[in-house]
Image (cartoon, grey):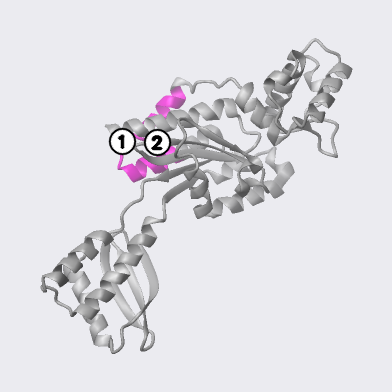
Amino acid sequence: MDEAIGDLSSRMRDIFRLVVEAYIERGVPIGSKMLAGSVSLSPASIRGVMQELEERGLLTHPHTSAGRIPTESGLRLFVDGIMQASVPGERERAAIEAQLRDRPIEQALDAATSMLSGLSACAGVILAPKQEQRLRQLSFVPLDRTRALAVLVGIDGSVENRVVPLSPGTNAAQLVEVGNFVSARLSGLTLGEAVARLRTEVAERRQAIDSAAAELVAAGLAAWSIDLDQRPLLIVRGQANLIDAAAAADLDHVRRLLEELEDRQEIARVLEGARSAEGCRIFIGSEHRMFALSGSSVIAAPWRGSEGQVVGVVGVIGPTRLNYARVVPMVDFTAQALTRMMES
């Protein structure tokens, strides 16, 4: 279905807009009697128009109700062709900016995500710049003659484990020597810095461990660095907002959405799709394969660093009936506020 707003008569546009707005506000199927006081048409005439809209694929009706709800195609047409976005109020703008003021960036991002979640009654999400891991210590626990468990501890207390292959003849004493070397020479460095320093010392023959042990450390750190660099910092707040009175009638969809929000790598991929957008990008329901089952929507906008480059994406995830006219400009304002924070 590729319906255009210009293909609808003025009467159809009016009825369609009223149905969508009433559905977004109430979360229930909308019948002709609900609209009778808003237009100068009889309930019978309204039902006729709603039937035409259903035949065009813009409305549908649950089998248990005579009322209509917009389809995903209908919501897309509404967002692109009818919706009139409202500018966030002064109090909302001030509340968002207050969360970004005089805080370390990690705290500011967390607070802004929670604030956006509360204001939109959705789950707030933010894809932040990747944070380089700094090394505290690296130790190896032998598993057998060919493998060891490498344990990396970061300055922030995070722990990463990985099984690594050992060169023939590597013994437990050498593994202890490796750990002592890392603690003495590489602690406090990022993984990339640690690899560079280690290779420099090997090249200049200043290393306190032999070349085979040094290569074991370098290979492990390099692999970790690549792995961690591919994991974006994703903050998700306000999942509880998704369970409201209207959602109680469709708990299966809510449960699926909550399960989807647990898949952080997939959520990050969804947000990555908004990095190239000039403003807000909107995914409605099955427009993104991740939300085909839960019937959810994503509104996301990129935010930029001091040199104008895109460094992250902020947005909300909620039911398809979310208040697009209110939430879209709110997400856009939050992205602008984050950009201003990075520029200051």
57 sits to left or right of 195: right
Q: Residue at x 31, y 35 (%)?
A: 342
Quarter of the view holding residue 34: top right
Front-lying residue, 142 or 55: 55
Q: Is residue 318 magenta?
A: no
Quadrant containing the N terminus is top right
Q: Position of residue 274 (x, y in %)?
A: 48, 39
Residue labelled with disc 2? 303
Sooner in the amino-acid sequence: mark 2 or mark 1: 2
- Prevailing SS of the magenta stretch: helix
Q: Is residue 94 magenta?
A: yes
Residue labelled with disc 1? 342
Furthest-top residue in this view: 40
198 sits to left or right of 329: left
* Magenta-colored span: 91-113
224 sits to left or right of 136: right
Q: SS for tag 2?
A: strand
Front-lying residue, 209 or 105: 209
Are circles 2 and 1 on residues that touch, CB within 8 Å?
yes
Quadrant containing the C terminus is top left
Q: Position of residue 84 (x, y in %)?
A: 58, 20
Q: Residue at x 21, y 80 (%)?
A: 177
Given the image, on which type of amino acid does mark 1 rest? Met
Quarter of the view holding residue 142: bottom left
Front-lying residue, 241 or 255: 255
Q: Residue at x 38, y 30 (%)?
A: 337
Distance between the Cα atoms at labels 2 and 1? 9 Å
